[in-house]
Image (cartoon, grey):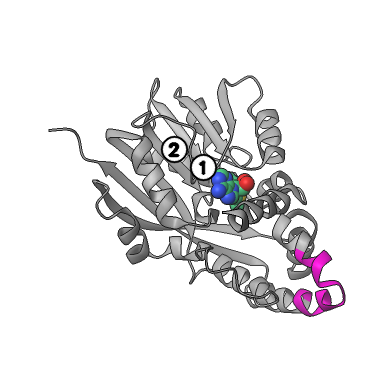
Amino acid sequence: MEQLAQYKESVRTTWSAGDYDAMMRQEGLYDVGSRLVRTVGVRPGEDVLDVACGTGNATIPAAQAGARVTGLDLTPVMLARARERAGGLEIEWVEGDAEEMPFSDEQFDVVLSTFGCMFAPRHEVVADEIARVLRPGGRLGVCTWTPAGVIGEFFRVVGGYFPPDASYVDPPLSWGEEDHVRELFEGTGIELSFGREVSVIRHESPSAAVDCYATKFGPVVLARQALDDRWPALRDDLLKLFTSYDAVLPAEYLVIQGRRASRA
Ligand SMILES: C[S@@+](CC[C@H](N)C(=O)[O-])C[C@H]1O[C@@H](n2cnc3c(N)ncnc32)[C@H](O)[C@@H]1O
């Protein structure tokens, strides 16, 4: 489908803009990947896939835990930064689509994704792909922003300045709702459990928070360019949002854990 291919090209452009790695370091969000690897209990020698791995949030700690790790992402710029961050760690970095994973059935003991698979447009397609590549008895660990949390609010504020996404793009924040995720994995043989965690993001001031997103976070860097003389209005709305939290953002996310049934 031509439109879907174009959409994915725009996704690459979006995540190539700004400096995602600098933002993640500034906001302390690389802790989320390390925490997820501990929660799922990644063990040495396991085959682990990090879906939409970006700059390696979960990929790198999984490799540090001794697993054989593959990071999959659509955006070459993100993968290049991930490689640099990984230093001498042995990790297979693969450019590819979460909706059409270039992997065999039942290839992985563990599938992880932090704020990653939620951005692929067709949720059911991605969930089916995750289930396909997971071995019987395998584990799943996914972190997704919740719609009710401050990052959910942030995406709604930015999205309010643009026309709604096309009908073939499922809303990313739905991955932060338990009922939706349960529906996605129905019939896959993966039994799910849910938890919620909060990562506290601290900026020096509300305007420093706006500056961070406007210069480093691809979706806002591009929004600023596209909006042109409407940018000050979005800037003010973001400033209001961050001021309401005094620049200390309690970023809530859903932790989705799953286990695929073992073969009888
Ligand atoms: C918010 S970043 C998260 C990156 C990383 N997992 C993290 O926790 O920092 C979203 C990532 O999803 C990737 N992405 C979006 N759609 C994708 C798709 N269909 N297949 C693979 N990666 C995708 C983007 O390229 C980007 O690197």
- Residue name at image x 73 percent, y 51 percent: 13
Q: Position of residue 100 (x, y in %)?
A: 49, 42
The image quarter containing residue 209 is bottom right
* Helix, strand or loop at mark 1: helix
Label 1 amino acid?
A: Gly
Q: Is residue 106 visible?
A: yes
Q: Position of residue 71 (x, y in %)?
A: 54, 33
In three-dimensional space, the C-alpha distance between marks 2 and 1, rounded to whole angstroms, equals 6 Å
* Helix, strand or loop at mark 2: helix
Q: Does residue 261 appear left or right of residue 24 in this picture?
A: left
- Residue name at image x 62 percent, y 58 percent: 3
Residue toward you, 85 or 132: 132
Residue toward you, 178 or 14: 14
Residue farthest to the front, as pictured: 1
- Residue 225 colored magenta? yes
Q: Position of residue 152 (x, y in %)?
A: 55, 68
Q: Is residue 29 visible?
A: no
Q: Which residues are magenta?
A: 223-235
Q: Is residue 15 above or below residue 77?
A: below
Residue toward you, 226 or 60: 226
Tag 2: Cα neighbours inside 10 Å, few (<14), some, or many (≥20)? many
- Residue name at image x 48 percent, y 31 percent: 62
Q: Does residue 240 appear left or right of residue 58 in this picture?
A: right
Q: Are marks 2 and 1 in contact (CB under 8 Å)?
A: yes
The image quarter containing residue 130 is top left
Residue toward you, 94 or 5: 5
Location of mark 2 (residue): 37
The overriding secondary structure of the stretch rendered in magenta is helix
Label 2 amino acid?
A: Val
Q: Is residue 51 above or below residue 45?
A: below
Label 1 within 8 A of ligand 1 by Cβ: yes
Location of mark 1 (residue): 33
